[in-house]
């Protein structure tokens, strides 16, 4: 009796996968994969995951931006935090929290939701291409749009964090930027933002995908659908941390340029590179960025996949066409 039930469950899982229906925790059936509802959930999950995690690390982000703009004064994590609290009070560590919550929430929704959408489109169109090509194209396409959504928030956030007299937050910050510079002021750093986030996103998503595949094949040695929720989320977290750390190193030069441009420490990208120096581009604020980004990316993937799993969807990782092979 148990054997027939198990066989029936496997058959149902295979049929659900072939029809594009998610099979959730405990074999429960979720929403149809690659449907508008699916992409909406991925968008919402990405928004919640990114907005919440970025909000939580606002104090370290405030320090990071100040270290980039004034590396002589804020030269280490401990001394930098002490200086900010001593000179401007503990509340200074939460400057720009609105930009973190809403800006990175909008970016996260676009990044995760559109990545799922583009991965499906490229996977279907580029059947003979290798996996990395699909991952790179999907993440780049999603990130381009995500940064357009983020850029106005980032423009205000950086000014609020490094110029205490500029504005208190988004509500008074947006009008001040618009009055001083017009619409172009909100997108002053879009190109370097793409320069920072495009390589990061492409490497982060590709590293995550390949690491997840390696963990299931070589370490756990089970199919994803046969693993417990704890095993699935464990693989997600480990892959998330690795992908975040690798992406941070690659994107650090552009991150320094973004902060320099928004604070008018440089007139253009070339001037910023000359003033920071080649060594400084790669090393300035790198320790705190690794401290920030690794755990943040890990928690984003954890929250995102938790939402997917408990709404009946499979955890992240793999190409859409892989679902057709489930339990065959």
Image (cartoon, grey):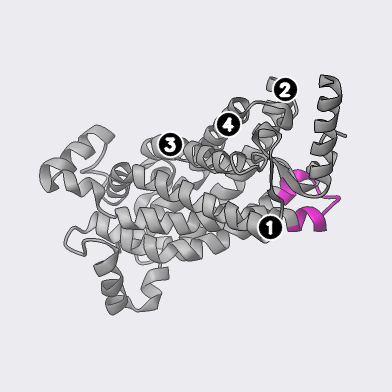
The percent position of residue 271, horizontal first and vertical second, equals: 38, 61
Label 2 and label 3: CA atoms lie apart by 27 Å
- Which residue was labeled with disc 3? 290
> Marks 3 and 4, how far apart in space?
22 Å
Relative to 305, residue 46 above or below: below
Residue 148 visible (yes or no): yes
Sequence order check, earlier mark of 3 and 4: 4
Q: Nearer the viewer, mark 3 or mark 4?
A: 4
Q: Secondary structure at mark 3?
A: helix
Disc on res. 218: 2
**Quarter residue 198 falls in:** bottom right
Q: Is residue 260 above or below residue 70?
A: below
**Residue range highlighted in magenta:** 121-134
Q: CA distance from mark 1 to mark 3?
A: 28 Å
**Earlier along the polypeptide chain: callout 2 or callout 3?**
2
N-terminal-most mark, 2 or 1: 1
Q: Are marks 1 and 4 in contact (CB under 8 Å)?
A: no
Q: Are the two marked residues, 2 and 1, in contact with CB atoms closer than 8 angstroms?
A: no
Q: Provide the residue designation for mark 1.
A: 118
């Amino acid at each position: 009796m148990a054997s027939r039930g198990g066989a029936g469950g496997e058959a149902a899982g295979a049929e659900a996968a072939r029809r594009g229906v998610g099979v959730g925790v405990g074999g429960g059936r979720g929403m149809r994969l690659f449907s508008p509802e699916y992409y909406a959930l991925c968008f919402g999950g990405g928004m919640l995951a990114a907005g919440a995690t970025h909000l939580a690390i606002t104090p370290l982000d405030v320090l990071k931006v100040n270290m980039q703009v004034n590396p002589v004064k804020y030269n280490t994590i401990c001394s930098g935090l002490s200086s900010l609290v001593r000179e401007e009070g503990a509340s200074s560590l939460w400057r720009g929290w609105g930009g973190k919550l809403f800006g990175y929430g909008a970016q996260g929704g676009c990044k995760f939701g559109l990545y799922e959408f583009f991965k499906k489109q490229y996977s279907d169109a580029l059947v003979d291409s290798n996996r990395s090509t699909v991952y790179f194209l999907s993440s780049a396409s999603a990130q381009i749009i995500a940064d357009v959504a983020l850029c106005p928030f980032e423009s205000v956030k950086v000014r609020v964090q490094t110029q205490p007299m500029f504005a208190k937050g988004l509500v008074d910050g947006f009008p001040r930027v618009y009055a001083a510079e017009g619409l172009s002021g909100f997108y002053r750093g879009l190109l370097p933002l793409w320069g920072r986030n495009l390589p990061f996103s492409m490497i982060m998503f590709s590293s995550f995908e390949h690491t997840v595949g390696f963990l299931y094949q070589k370490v756990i040695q089970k199919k994803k659908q046969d693993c417990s929720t704890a095993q699935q989320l464990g693989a997600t977290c480990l892959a998330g941390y690795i992908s975040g750390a690798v992406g941070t190193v690659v994107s650090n030069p552009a991150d320094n340029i973004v902060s320099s441009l928004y604070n008018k420490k440089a007139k253009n990208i070339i001037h910023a590179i000359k003033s920071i120096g080649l060594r400084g581009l790669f090393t300035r604020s790198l320790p705190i960025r690794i401290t920030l980004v690794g755990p943040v990316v890990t928690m984003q993937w954890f929250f995102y996949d938790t939402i997917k799993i408990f709404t009946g969807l499979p955890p992240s990782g793999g190409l859409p066409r892989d679902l057709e092979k489930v339990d065959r």
